Image (cartoon, rainbow, N blue to C red):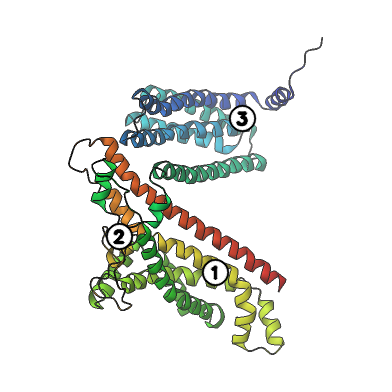
Amino acid sequence: MKFSLPSWKKKSFVYLKKRSGNSLLAGGLLFLPAVIFTIFAVSQIFTPINDYLARGSPWDISFNDTIARTLLNMVFLVPPIIMFIASYLQVESHSLGFKISIALSIGFLFGAIFNVTNTYLLLFSMAFCILSGITGFGERKKTQTTKNSPIVTEKVAQFGLRLSGVLCISTLFGLLAYVTVRGAQFLSWNFITGNALDYGTIARRVAGLELGPIGGIRDLILGGLLVVGFCELIAIPLGLGAAIFLSEYAPDNRFVSALRFFIETLAGAPSIVIGLFGFTFFVKIAGMGVSLPAAGLSLAIMILPWNIRVAEEAMRAVPQAYREASYALGAAKWQTIKRTVLLPASPGVITGILLGVGAAFGETAVLIFTASGMGTTSLPSHISLIGGQGQSMPVLAVWILGAYKYVIPPTGTGITATTVWEEANVAYTASLVLLIIFFAISVGALILRNYLAKKTRGA
């Protein structure tokens, strides 16, 4: 019976046979500490999980502590991943291999000096990285290789990009999972459509000191929608008008370039700064008080640069040939913009507007100063469009901040860490509703964009 190796083993054997002895040695010198460091990292990651299970998996603040420690310990996976990549580069005689090895050895030395983690492991890894770097550098000098393989560079780049994608997606789904797990406890139709939500009532009823439902967030949702609606009534026409001017009418000179620069700068301005401006100008100087107009105008200032930039880029993406064909048929400038430019640009414009609506609905800093205090949960009996005192608007995002920040341990018996934990879960339930609303807006923007894109293609 003839013995034959599996195909993957054959390929591996052929691959290694083609490499020089020094390259394999340099790669192996990095591979060994990479494996040992990986084992150490995995043990560190599972240590807080084992401690949590040993305590009986309590559903309280220790759950947060376990997640935080586990995520923090995942940092220990970074050095072995880099060492595995450098090991592959060393085997391929790539110049980055010995450079990364030397850089790693310096990093491990500083880690050992400042006692970042296991000193012996760091010194052990440092020694092997130095040996690998020297061996790899000697091989490069010996063979006088000056060019790196583009295939190897491409593979390393692809790995880095895939790893970045996995990390981003994992972070997103981890966030959604955490909010869902903590928020599902109080999620119900009555929580969405009910009203009369109060910090003290939540504390007493969660603790079992008072019977009845905890209340609902109906007015918080309606208040947020009213504020965002008022904001967009101002931001959409102004933003679209400014975008049309910049895209179709503005000359290409330094003034217009400076104007675009300031618009982009304003788009990145911290929301707390806009909130302070809104409080100073609209609430105090204009005498609107904390009200719907003050909040809407302040949010419009924050959203306006986004609307301008998205709309302008969507219109600039329309081919110039469309405009020239319209002019050739005798259409005037405004007719061309209205019928030839705005329609093809409408998917991008509307998508940007709807995403701006989602961002405005979840805004907190601006609305703390201009809409309401954190305890406001009911719409005023009458809403003035010119502002004034007594017009505080309930907003969901602001209430969530207050609900989590001001957890009230109620006086009485039966108050435990779990009770306070569950009280804070109400804020996560409201956060879950906020995420659902934002998801609905995003899906609506996607559907509308696709519909308008098909319509414009058909036209």
Residue 38, percent across and down? Answer: 48, 27
Q: Can residue 295 be seen in this view?
A: yes
Q: Is disc 1 placed on a helix, strand or loop?
A: helix
Disc ID at residue 184: none
Q: Describe residue 178's horizontal placement relative to residue 82 as left or right.
A: left
> Disc 3 versus disc 1: distance between alpha carbons?
52 Å
Q: Looking at the image, which is closer to me, 338 or 220?
A: 220
Residue contact at pointers 3 and 1, CB within 8 angstroms: no
Residue at 47% of width from left, 32% of height from top?
A: 77
Q: Name the residue under label 2.
A: 377
> What's the amino acid at mark 3?
Val
Q: Mark 1 points at which residue?
A: 350
Q: Describe residue 407's horizontal placement relative to residue 47 as left or right.
A: left
> What's the amino acid at mark 1?
Ile
> Disc 2 versus disc 1: distance between alpha carbons?
31 Å
Please identify the residue farthest to the right as the structure is shown.
Answer: 1
Q: Name the residue under label 3.
A: 91
* Tally of numbered discs: 3
Classify residue 329 by image quadrant.
Answer: bottom right
